[in-house]
Image: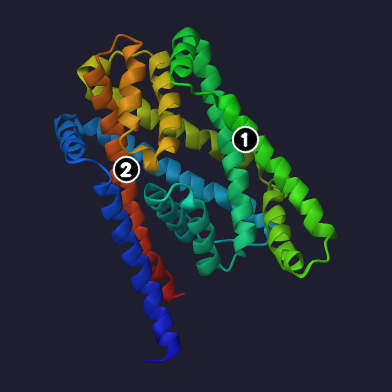
Amino acid sequence: MQKKQLIKLLKTILPLALGVFLIWYSLQSATPAERRELWTNIKEANPLYIALSLLFGVLSHASRAYRWKYLLQPLGYRPRFANSFMAVMAAYLANLGIPRSGELLRAATISTYEEVPFEKAFGTIIVERLADFCMLLLVIAIALGLQSENLLNYMREQQINPLITLGVLIGFLLMLWIAVRIIRNSKNRVLVKVRGFVIGLVEGMRSILQMKNKGAFIFHTFFIWGMYVLMFWIVKFTVPETANASWGAVLSAFVVGSFAISATNGGIGVYPVAIGALLLVFDIPKQAGEAYGWIIWGSQTALVIVLGALSFLLLPLYNRRS
């Protein structure tokens, strides 16, 4: 077999094998009892509300893929939407197996199929994360405005402090800035090689300052998070005890769920428990709150598994004809 044919075959087989492994890993990470409870809750829930939640989820993912182009255009790259969307979904699936590995995979995917330098693509993803973090802070502020006492007491009990996350983020950016200054003036051979990567990374991050369509970028950012909140809110109607939950309770649960997702691989095992514990504060029974958490987590995780696995499979096939 010729070398080119072997490389082409590996590009088809390896992504598929990785996708199958990540599906197996994400399912095996849950206990048998958790899997049984997951499927029972989903089967008993009203499928209409779950379908609407999944629709909102797909719209948010599609908007994220489309928003990405506004950061890549100033760098001179115009990736096809299909590749951007599949890169996003493959990244979400990877995050279920190895937390935060998805960002690296996403940059590598768009680099492979759209010839965008990895470091520049990764820089734009960092910018996206900064925008998303600002949106999370906005949602936290709204939730505190609606239910400040309940949410603050819960976060204090669970030792959740968003200011720590903000501090870590600022510290990371400061360290990156210092590293850039050192590398820029260094004559060390190793650091000279690193310089090219860092320059590309910074160029990707600076793309937000060069955008011509800042308004469209901001619109999609708000749209993405609006869909996040809606896909979470609509599921409350699947459980009788949560159907009458106030917006304050729903947003508070959404905030807690956002932190729970970062605690483990995609929130496996933690997300439903965190939602149930938070909703207890609003006099919603623990079992009902956890059922709510299982349904939203289970349906959206299933969506990521299906679309992520299909993306791993279709990426090489879609680009074979290109």
At x 35% / y 63%, what residue is drawn?
18
Residue 34 or residue 68, whichever sits in front: 34
Numbered disc 1: secondary structure: helix
On the rendered structure, is 232 left or right of 78? left
In percent of width and height, residue 148 lies at 50, 10
Amino acid type, callout 1: Val
* Residue 168: mark: 1
Residue 227 or residue 297, whichever sits in front: 297
Which is nearer the N-term, disc 1 or disc 2? Answer: 1
Is the residue marked by circle 2 packed among few (<14), some (14-19), or many (20+) residues within 10 Å?
some
Amino acid type, callout 2: Thr
Residue 157 or residue 110, whichever sits in front: 157
Residue on which the image places disc 2: 301
At x 58% / y 53%, what residue is drawn?
69
On the rendered structure, is 280 left or right of 46? right
At x 53% / y 18%, what residue is drawn?
142
In percent of width and height, residue 317 lies at 37, 71
Q: Residue 80, relative to residue 317: is it above or below?
A: above
